């Protein structure tokens, strides 16, 4: 007996072992044909393309053939043959079929092609079975893998920071509280405030908005670290670029100054883009054709150009002199809106921009203060279509300067005494940044809404599955 080849669709499509008996399992995308012969396009998620199954209906029970409908799941045994059909090299002539699961055509929601992304969001539990989400999710895997690869190859250590924390110092956004107190019967202090002493951790706790503060502790011991985990922000901003639960990559490097931080950010982003182009071209081509005709060009373009490096003050000047009418007017000191960031990137420079030296009042307390007393060594990387994709800085390593900033801003010294202590015990110049993983995915896939680059988006009023 010849052995049965058990390969996935991706492997079979690349195989040339014609005449070989194979088994393949997957979901039916389409079925067409006539009374005598049926052609089934089968997809198993391994690749964007389907494999064609040819079924001579006379060789099978009628009942079985009827059960093969869009969405049903099959196990097919057959012979791998060269295909004479268009657009495929191989197909399978079925000899044996098991229907693992039927999908009643009257109720299965993914009957036809070309569903809107809005509709697919409503059936997020099934949308991974579409071509679009298959491509997006494979690319999501690809980028996760490439991120680990990039850092591992360069001597960074993957450092795990806690998801539940007691510090709200990032000032990065509202936090989701974590508690085991009885919400219908909250214990109160004599002053009438919630008494957290009986709560699970004995004090108020929340989901983290960033792993950075703890990441710095890692860098000041291991040298170069990165985090890659979920973060949570309870800001009620219903935009196409914000999620309530998103993933963040945060490298943190001892002895890096702002310049090296920028070099790393640029090299890192280019590496990821190149990785996608070199390894997942089929998925990118599909997304380019379906949703964003300029996708491949845009990816190439970012790869081929140096990022512009510009001071905030210069950027504001350009915006003010642009003659462009913005919804939010521009003046020195404002926090730039995405319309401003995109003007600089898409209209003015037509290149990605790294903006540095922001006013200290609009940036976090931990950023290194410049000599001018007004600005801090922040760096935001701004991308076409996205706006801010990375936010980072050189960190303030001077204990007194850091402490005075904490006090100025009225932050709770008690909850970050451990962070301040790193500046008392062997402090060092260091830098880092945060890349929002889904912002990266927006750029890589060309999708327009951040809800479409994560399997199960969390946004205000949206937590069904
Ligand atoms: P923005 O101004 O775009 O709201 P931010 O300045 O609040 O972002 P940071 O605190 O600098 O963001 O976070 C670092 C990175 O995390 C950002 O550059 C962005 O890529 C990503 N990010 C921030 N907030 C979100 C969010 N709500 N959903 C998805 N990604 C986010
Ligand atoms: Mn930012």
Image: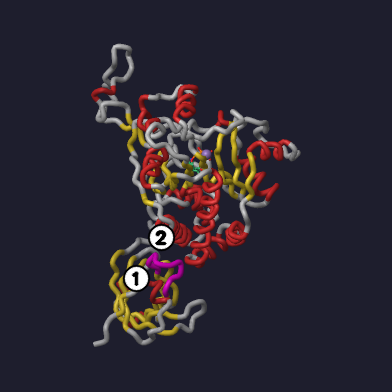
| Picture coordinates of residue 199, whole percent (x, y) | 26, 27
Residue holding disc 2: 129
Residue 75 picture quarter? bottom left
Q: How crowded is mark 2: few (under 14 residues within 10 Å), some or many (20 or more)?
A: some
Instruction: Using the rendered image of the protein, determine whether residue 254 is visible from the camera's viewpoint.
Output: yes
Q: Main secondary structure of the magenta part?
A: loop
Mark number, residue 325: none
- Please give the name of the residue rendered at 33% of the width and 17% of the height, measured from the top-left corner: 193
Residue 195 picture quarter? top left
Whether 401 is among the magenta residues is no
Depth check: give the residue in front, 249 or 94.
249
| Picture coordinates of residue 278, whole percent (x, y) | 50, 66
Q: How far separated are the C-alphas under marks 1 and 2?
A: 21 Å
Depth check: give the residue in front, 114 or 7.
7
| Picture coordinates of residue 411, whole percent (x, y) | 44, 24
Instruction: Using the rendered image of the protein, determine whether residue 236 is visible from the camera's viewpoint.
Output: no
The span picked out in magenta is: 43-51
Horizontal side of 320 relative to 241 (left or right) equals right
Residue holding disc 1: 66
Colour logic: secondary structure
């Amino acid at each position: 007996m010849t052995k049965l080849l058990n390969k996935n669709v991706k492997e079979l499509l690349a195989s040339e072992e014609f005449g070989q008996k194979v088994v393949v399992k997957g979901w039916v995308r389409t079925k067409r044909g006539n009374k005598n012969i049926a052609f089934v396009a089968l997809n198993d998620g391994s690749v964007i393309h389907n494999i064609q199954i040819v079924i001579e209906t006379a060789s099978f029970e009628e009942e079985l053939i009827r059960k093969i409908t869009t969405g049903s799941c099959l196990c097919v045994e057959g012979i791998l043959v060269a295909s004479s059909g268009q657009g495929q090299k191989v197909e399978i002539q079925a000899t044996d079929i098991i229907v693992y699961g039927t999908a009643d055509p009257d109720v299965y929601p993914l009957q036809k092609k070309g569903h809107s992304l809005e509709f697919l969001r409503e059936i997020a539990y099934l949308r991974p079975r579409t071509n679009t989400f298959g491509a997006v999710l494979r690319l999501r895997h690809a980028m996760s893998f490439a991120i680990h690869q990039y850092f591992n190859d360069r001597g960074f250590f993957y450092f795990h920071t806690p998801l539940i924390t007691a510090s709200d110092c990032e000032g990065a956004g509202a936090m989701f509280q974590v508690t085991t107190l009885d919400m219908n019967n909250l214990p109160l202090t004599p002053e009438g405030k919630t008494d957290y002493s009986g709560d699970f951790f004995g004090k108020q706790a929340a989901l983290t908005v960033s792993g950075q503060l703890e990441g710095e502790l890692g860098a000041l011991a291991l040298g170069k670290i990165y985090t890659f985990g979920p973060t949570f922000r309870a800001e009620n901003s219903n935009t196409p670029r914000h999620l309530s639960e998103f993933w963040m990559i945060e490298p943190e490097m001892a002895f890096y100054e702002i310049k090296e931080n920028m070099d790393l950010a640029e090299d890192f982003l280019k590496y990821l883009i190149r990785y996608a182009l070199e390894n997942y071209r089929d998925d990118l081509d599909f997304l380019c054709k379906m949703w964003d005709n300029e996708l491949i060009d845009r990816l190439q373009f970012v790869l081929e150009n140096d990022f512009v490096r510009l001071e905030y003050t210069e950027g504001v000047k350009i915006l003010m002199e642009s003659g462009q009418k913005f919804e939010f007017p521009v003046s020195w000191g404002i926090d730039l809106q995405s319309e401003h960031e995109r003007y600089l990137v898409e209209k003015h420079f037509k290149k990605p921009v790294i903006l540095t030296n922001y006013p200290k009042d609009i940036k976090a307390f931990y950023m290194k203060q410049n000599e001018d007393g007004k600005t801090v060594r922040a760096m935001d990387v701004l991308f076409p279509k996205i706006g801010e994709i990375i936010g980072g800085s050189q960190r303030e390593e001077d204990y007194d300067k850091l402490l005075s900033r904490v006090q100025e801003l009225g932050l709770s010294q008690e909850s970050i005494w451990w962070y301040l202590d790193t500046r008392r015990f062997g402090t060092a110049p260091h830098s880092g940044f945060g890349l929002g993983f889904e912002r990266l995915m927006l750029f890589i896939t060309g999708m327009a809404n951040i809800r479409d680059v994560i399997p199960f988006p969390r946004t205000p009023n949206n937590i069904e599955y």
